[in-house]
Amino acid sequence: MTRSTACPDWADRLRAGESIIPPPIFPEQAEQALAVFKALRIVDAPGSPTFGESCAQWVFDLVASIFGAYDPESGRRLITEWFILIPKKNSKSTIAAGIMMTALVLNWRRSAEFAILAPTVEVASNSFGPARDMTRPDVDDELGALMHAQTHVKTITNQATDAFLKVVAADSNTVGGKKSVGTLVDELWLFGKVSNAENMLREATGGLASRPEGFVIYLTTQSDDPPAGVFAQKLQYARGVRDGTIDDPRFVPVIYEFPPDMVAAGEHRNPENFGMVNPNLGYSVDREFLLREYQKAENDGEESMRGFLAKHLNVEIGMALMSNRWAGAEYWERQSVGPVTLDDLISQCDVIDLGIDGGGLDDLLGLAAVGRHAVTRNWMLWTRAWAHPSVLERRKSEAPRFHDFAKHGDLVLVKRIGDDVDEVAEIASRVERSGKLDKVGVDPAGLGAILDALEQAGIPVEKVIGISQGWRMTGSIKTAERKLAEGAMVHGGQPMMAWCVGNARVEVRSNAIVITKQASGTAKIDPLLAMFNAVSLMALNPATNPMDNFLKFVASRASEAA
């Protein structure tokens, strides 16, 4: 029988309060590890109880799964990676310390290295403190005699084997060249905001190549923003293994989250269901505390509720949870019709308007194409954006997300300044040659280089229109909202555009509404503003010349074929 770590019935298991963690492959090894783990003391808990006295069953299941994957005869570990997504206050750092101390005790390799990799100094301290306290002679004289803790370098050494556990705040200097037998990555969601995190983690986990008994544990809460970077990658992979769409028997996903149908129905906000995703409820998680935090979040508004849902219930943040969000965000996701390409717009629409925005060295250059379907009259949207290398440097917090968008094809990372404008002009020229181009709407403040490029690409000057910004965009903003709400505007579900929509913040000025880049902070909305520029033109209900369109379309196809 082929071994699998998939858990396709995870939703039913969580509803029933059953384990979603696979049983150990080698029960004897699991029992040996549990004997060590259960004897360790939690010093910062009242009365300093042992793990055995104070833990919920899921913790023991996890420990058994990790250490019960080791084959003592071959010296190999049959499962090498664990991904654990668990809400805040479920004793994550303390459990991490206990698992790694157990590994340090049981390890047979001399001078072996174990590491807890944290994204910040503060998180590193949260993990090191409980581990150090377990080795205090007044807490456990036997363990105190065996281990030597050095607080200033956050290191604990097993004096019998010279193996050591080191807790480090990650950067490229601290993790380079690591050959750890076991690595626990704490708060992976924060690594998702670090530009070089993928390379950093690759360095930190490189020891698996030469240590067949090695393992990596990713332990994290949900992100307080839409998942990005290495966190988004690992989360997507873990869900794939869990659901059975990815076959990887060496990877264990342990994800405490609500099923999508419960989130869609709003059942995740029912306090009766909080225990589904808080396996330590009644232990380190106090029900009354959760209820108070929930009530406070309700009183403080959706922005506060967003944080509560992410951190205490592991609800992945979407665009519709922000209190000052653009009203169109509420309808955005439901208006996705699957992949929509520029070719789709050219072949299915009778007229197309283009919008352009951004393009500074600190901005994305956004292009939006809004086409009117020749049959349904619905509006179809396609977008693309370009970024200079300087944007990745100046917006390091967003760099992982930009690389994700580039992989999807929504964002082009140009190597030379000017390539972005040239590519925009070429797309505009392509639409013009098809006979479907009505006009190109641009921010008047950024006309310079774009106007020159459009003219060189054969776009008639009279077709390039300056679109007034600020409060004057109120009409196009409200038009887009209404079209989305009516179901008369569809898009291709592009991740980059969803992110931009989620970033949009509305400001009320007199009797107008304004969406500005300043209100969005470091997050970008340039493709969304480009969409508003295109919408303002399409709202004028441009006329079409069917014969002219046909002739230009035929000529375009002939040119492309040649």
Image: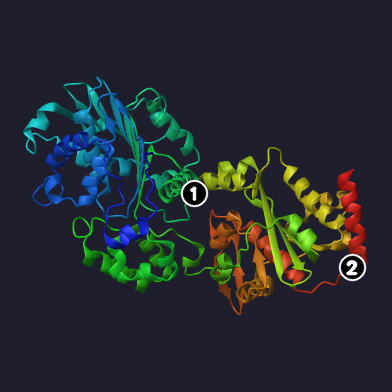
Q: Residue at x 15, y 36 (%)?
A: 36
Image quadrant in which the C terminus is located = top right
Q: Which mark is on residue 388?
A: none
Image quadrant in which the N terminus is located = top left
Q: Residue at x 76, y 50 (%)?
A: 424
Extreme residue in the front direction: 1
Mark 1 or mark 2: whose residue is earlier in sequence = 1
The residue where tag 1 is placed is 228
**Residue 437 placement: quadrant:** bottom right
Residue 259, placed above or below residue 478: above
**Residue 371 placement: quadrant:** bottom right
Q: Secondary structure at mark 1?
A: loop
Q: Secondary structure at mark 2?
A: helix
| Residue 519 visible to the viewer | no
Mark nearer the viewer, 1 or 2: 2
Residue 456, placed above or below residue 310: above
Residue 509: horizontal and vertical position, in percent?
58, 75
| Residue 261 visible to the viewer | yes
Q: Residue at x 63, y 76 (%)?
A: 486
Extreme residue in the bottom direction: 511
Asked which colour scheme the image uses, the reply is rainbow
Q: Residue at x 37, y 50 (%)?
A: 7
Residue 139: horizontal and vertical position, in percent?
8, 39
Amino acid type assigned to the residue bearing label 2 in the image = Pro
Residue 294: horizontal and vertical position, in percent?
31, 68
**Residue 76 placement: quadrant:** top left
The residue where tag 2 is placed is 546
Amino acid type assigned to the residue bearing label 1 in the image = Ala
